[in-house]
Amino acid sequence: MTESPQAHRKDEHLSLGVSLWRDTTPKKQIGASFDDIRWLPNTFPEMSIEDVDVTTNLFQHQFNWPFYIEAMTGGSALTGRVNGQLATVSANTGLAMAVGSQSIALKEPSQATTFKIVRQRNPEGFIFANLGADHPIANVRDAIDMIDANAIEMHVNVAQELVMAEGDRQFKWLDNLAEVIAKSPVPVIIKEVGFGMSVATYQTIAQLHPAAINVGGANGTNFAVIERRRNRNDDSFNIDNYGLSTVESLISAQLAQNALPLIATGGIQNANHIVTSLMLGANLASSAGFMLQTLMDHGELDLTKQILDWQQALPRLFTLLGAKNIAELQQNQPLYSNSLQNFISQQKKRS
């Protein structure tokens, strides 16, 4: 069966996203990276690894692990198969999982199966639905019902849309998001898609009172690059280096005195990145492109092993830092590089 142009776009996103992660050319980092954070050694942790509790409570749910498989895909035959594989891995490893944008399934009901497979493969798991910030509450309810979702990510993606040749050019979302948050039957997360969040953004979101914020920082999957490549590398609108990194976004939340739960996404590639994200105030972390590349290149077993390795490493890293849980971990004060200190100094001057 011939698929629609929108379904084809889902396949292009998948192919280009994986290609960017496969590229071994040293990638230019946008802003501060995880390498700009150093942990202070704890010579006398006075605890054992058995004392560690890495669970985190959010949305009135206890997550056994402080990270999950982030939103990636769905909406075509190929991406539906990938969703099924990711759901199998999430079920086998006890991780939560988010699906990619379900807007296509609302327009093309035949594509709903490419999302429903996630709940079929992981009937007991915590599953995040996903829609753009312009979708009305009726669509939100349909997306939640489609996969029996436990929560929904409403993604904000101005930069991606503006690069996309067929993207939106009008962005009036706040009133709609306020209604969705007030009326949604499940918790609502406001999520960036790879461009990070500033102090001003957190201050605006605070007035909406969502259940959580997903910072969606730079240095993970870059949709500005992906959409430009879809446009045959059109340089007339090039914002490849736009945005704040995940580290900068988490620190911006501190500077904004953000009180809402945070999810750290954007360039999470190992257990150390998860620990640093938690240390900087995140309640959860999540990984998308890095996990997707592992799955596409090596298969379900290798992705499962990667996740199990992270799960094994986390209690050891907590012990290394003398932290029995996330609250104690967040009492650690890391060292910042000169460039990151400069970022903080500039942000403080603006506030």
Image (cartoon, rainbow, N blue to C red):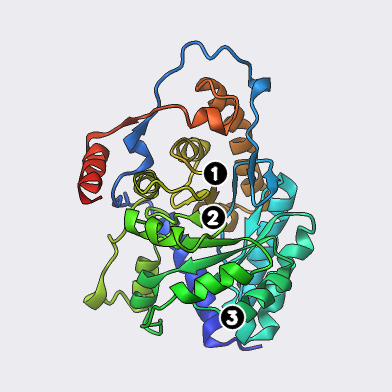
Tell me which label, 3 or 2, sits earlier in the chain. 3
- SS class of the residue under badge 2? strand
Cβ atoms at labels 3 and 1 below 8 Å apart: no
Residue on which disc 1 sits: 283
Q: In the figure, residue 165 lies in which quadrant?
A: bottom left
Residue ID at (38%, 72%): 158
Residue closest to the eye, 275 or 293: 275
> Mark 3 or mark 1, which is nearer to you?
1
Mark 3 lies on residue? 104
Q: Position of residue 138 (x, y in %)?
A: 64, 80
> Where's residue 197, x and y in %?
37, 56
Pointer 2: what residue? Answer: 212
- Quick one: label 3, few (<14), some, or many (20+) residues within 10 Å? many
| 313 or 134, nearer to the observer | 134
Up-down relation of residue 197 to residue 177 (above or below): above
Q: Quadrant of the N terminus?
A: bottom right
Q: Is residue 17 above or below residue 316?
A: below
Q: Residues within 10 Å of mark 2 (few under 14, many from 20)?
A: many
Type of amino acid at the residue the image marks with label 2: Ala
Q: Secondary structure at mark 3?
A: helix
> x and y percent of residue 125 in the render?
74, 54
Q: Is residue 263 rendered to the left or right of residue 222?
A: right
The type of residue carrying mark 3 is Ile
Q: CA distance from mark 3 to mark 1?
A: 30 Å
- The answer for how far apart the CA atoms under marks 3 and 2 are is 25 Å
262 or 161, nearer to the observer? 262
* Callout 1 touching callout 2 (CB < 8 Å): yes
Q: CA distance from mark 1 to mark 2?
A: 9 Å
Of mark 1 and mark 2, the one earlier in the sequence is: 2
Kind of residue at disc 1: Asn
Which residue is pictured at 57% across the width and 72% down the height?
180
Q: Earlier in the sequence, mark 3 or mark 1?
A: 3
